[in-house]
Amino acid sequence: MAVHPERTDDAATVRWHVAGGLLAADDTLLREDPYIAQLTSAGVLAGVAADGAIVTTLAGGHTWAGVGAAVREAVQHAVTTLGQSPLAEDRDAVLARLARQVVHDETGPYVASHGGRIDLLGVRAGAVYVRMRGACDGCPAASWTIQARLERRLRAAAPWLVAVHVTEDLPAHDLSSCPIPPTREMHRPGSLLM
């Protein structure tokens, strides 16, 4: 996977954007990568975080000109390692977290701007189950929204995604292994539930 560095307001901090836009990792997994851990223990990196991108902060006394290549190599290694499919039993949990992120940050606000709402119902066996409400319920463009704004983003970060299903109710099979937590309604009519 390709990474692209972006400057921040802090000269010691760089955000590394991951091709596909999503990073299925938390800070702990990122810091445990052996290349990142080596730079941290050597005092080259003062901080590493995952927030949809990898954020690295140099320790005092280091410059990007001096250690930038080593940090890029470590970030690339972490992205490659973390980009590998998780164990089968973890895939649905990763997929549920990614689905919440994409719906909250992208798809949900888009749907809400058209007077609709998208509810995440659950994830099972690599499939994401959603329900469309409001103006989007039954709209012919809803399938495009799901494919272009949700499924494509999820598949980029989770290639094991089987499908995104739009349904009114949970399927007959048990989704209790990885349900999406209960949602709360935002205070605007027609707004995204999260």
Image (cartoon, rainbow, N blue to C red):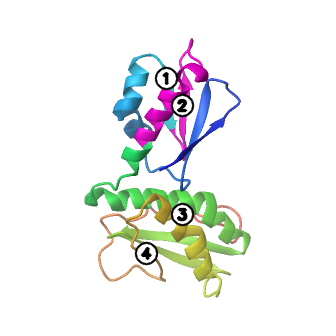
CB under 8 Å between discs 2 and 3: no
CB under 8 Å between discs 1 and 2: yes
- Give the quarter of the image for residue 178: bottom left
Q: Which segment is the magenta one?
A: 50-78
Residue sitting at 67 percent across and 26 percent down? 10
CB under 8 Å between discs 3 and 1: no
The mark lying in front, picked from 4 and 1, is 1
Amino acid type at mark 1: Leu
Disc 1 designates what residue?
45
- Considering only vertical position in the picture, is 9 above or below 142? above
Amino acid type at mark 2: Thr
Amino acid type at mark 4: Ala
Q: Magenta stretch: residue 71 in it?
A: yes
Q: Could you say where residue 180 lies in the image, as x and y percent from the top left?
A: 43, 63
What label sits on residue 25 in the rendered view? Answer: none
Specify which label sits upstream in the sequence, 2 or 4.
2
